[in-house]
Image (spheres, rainbow, N blue to C red):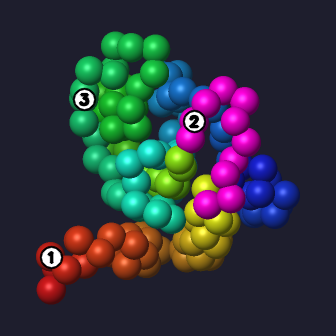
Amino acid sequence: MYDFLLKENLRGVDLLTDFQLQIEHVLDLEDRHRILFVDASVTASAPFELVRLLPEMDASYSSHAMSPQALLAAYKKVNHCAPPPTWLLSIRGYEFGLGLPLSATASDNLLAALGYVRQLLNTDSESEWADHYEAADPLRSSLAN
């Protein structure tokens, strides 16, 4: 995802790539309007899932890799205010072995997620992002009706 978006020369969008979230990433969240974490997942529905994240201290805050929710909780504690609105886009993957190439199905999922992210990035307001979130989450949409 990062490589694709980097080639698009997006204005007003900062891209950051890393393998693990660390406490130092709290600084990367400062002065942002919205945050979108993107990750691969063996449990997400295909082709991808989008969920809204809230600060939540969990056991990962004391490990070498933090969950996005724990990072948001650390942000709140350090900055004494709520973090920017944050979402997690989980792209369905299938095999995660060292050196394994991306499967054709996972590649299709990545391309679908990329198209979706392009739509999100062309949407300015948080309420429109929330509309996208509801559309991407059929369970939440059905519960809202």
Which kind of residue does numbered mark 1 sit on?
A: Leu
Tell me if residue 13 comes above or below residue 125 in the rendering. Answer: above
Q: Find the distance from the CA under tag 2 to the CA under tag 1.
A: 33 Å
Instruction: Give the labeled residue for mark 2.
Output: 96
**Picture coordinates of residue 100, whole percent (x, y):** 70, 36
Q: Secondary structure at mark 1?
A: helix
Front residue of this view, candidates 80 and 73: 73
Left-right relation of 16 to 52: right
Mark 1: give few (<14), some (14-19) or many (20+) Cα within 10 Å: few
Span of residues in magenta: 95-105
The residue that mark 1 highlights is 143
| Badge number at residue 57 | 3
Q: Of helix, strand and loop, which one carries label 3?
A: loop
- What is the spatial separation of the Cα atoms under label 1 and label 3, in whole angstroms? 27 Å
Q: Identify the image quadrant of residue 96.
A: top right
Whole-percent x, y for residue 128 in the image = 43, 78
Number of numbered discs? 3
Q: Quadrant of the C terminus?
A: bottom left
